[in-house]
Image: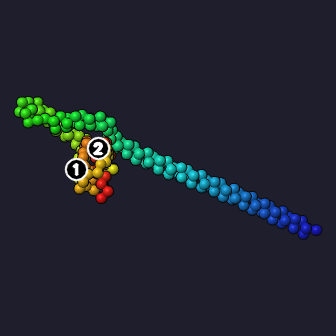
Amino acid sequence: MAEPKDNEFLDDIADAEAEEFAASLDELEDEAVELDELRAERDELKDRWMRALADAENARKRGDKARREAEQYGGSKLARDMLPVFDNMKRAVEAITEEQKEASAALIEGIELTMRELLKTFAKHGIEVISPEVGDKFDPNVHEAMFEAPVPNTKAGDIIQVSAQGFMLHDRLLRAAQVGVSSNPG
C-alpha cells in the first residue's frame, strides 16, 4: 500500500512541475507578447519621428525657397509699375530733335541721364530689357503679337515692327515685348 502513496506523491510532484512549467511558458509567452508590443510601439515611434524629421526638413526647404523668391521677385509689382515710366522717358528721348538738343542741352542731358540711371537701377535689381529687332523670329514666350500683316520679303513669324520693349525679372517675364508679326505664307 505504501507504493501507491509514493506514486501519488510522485504524481503530485510531476503535476506541480508541469504546472510550474506551464506557468513559466505562459510567463514567457506573456513576455514575448509584451516584447512584440514594445517592438511594434518602438517601430511606430521611430516611423513617426522619421516623418516629423522629414516634415521639418521639407518646411525648412520651403522656407528657404520662399525667402529666395521674395528676395528676387518681391519687387515685381513695383518694377511692373515702373515700366510705363521707362516707356514714356524712352519716347521723350526719341522725340528730341537736333534743334531742341541745341536749345536745351542741359535739360535733355538730364533726361538722358535719368534714363540711364533707371536702366542701371533695373539691371541692379535683375530687370533685363527684351529688345527684339525687326527680322527676328517671333517667340511667344517673350513676345506678344499685337497684329499680323503680310509683308513682302518676310517669312511667317518674322517680327516686322516693335511697338514696345519687354522686360524680364531674373527668369520671369514682367512684360512681353509688343511686336507686329508677318503672316506671309512663305
- Residue 66: x, y in percent? 38, 43
The outermost residue toward the right is 1
Question: Which of the 4 quarters of the picture holds residue 25?
Answer: bottom right
**Where 151 falls versus 96 (above or below)?**
below
What residue is shown at x 27% (from left), y 56% (from top)? 155
| Residue at left offset 31%, top offset 45% | 147
Q: Is residue 79 above or below residue 26?
A: above
Callout 1: SS: loop
Tell me if 24 is positioned left or right of 145 in this view.
Answer: right
* Residue 113 shown left or right of residue 83 in the figure: left
Hey, which quadrant is residue 164 in on the image? top left
Q: CA distance from mark 2 to mark 1?
A: 12 Å
Residue that mark 2 sits on:
178
Query: Circle 1: is it few (<14), some (14-19), or many (20+) Cα within 10 Å?
Result: some
Residue under label 1: 134
Assign the N terminus to one quadrant of the image: bottom right
Name the colouring of the figure.
rainbow
Residue 10's label in the rendered image is: none
Camera-side residue: 70 or 145? 145
Identify the amino acid type marked 1.
Answer: Val
Spot occupied by residue 150 in the image (x, y as percentages of width and height): 29, 51
Callout 2, which amino acid? Gln
Q: Nearer the viewer, residue 63 or 144?
A: 144
In the rendered image, the quadrant that contains the C terminus is: bottom left
Relative image position of residue 128 (x, y in whole percent):
25, 45
Tell me the SS state at disc 2. strand
Return the residue nearer the eye: 61 or 127.
127
Q: Residues within 10 Å of mark 2 (few under 14, many from 20)?
A: many
Q: Is residue 92 visible?
A: yes
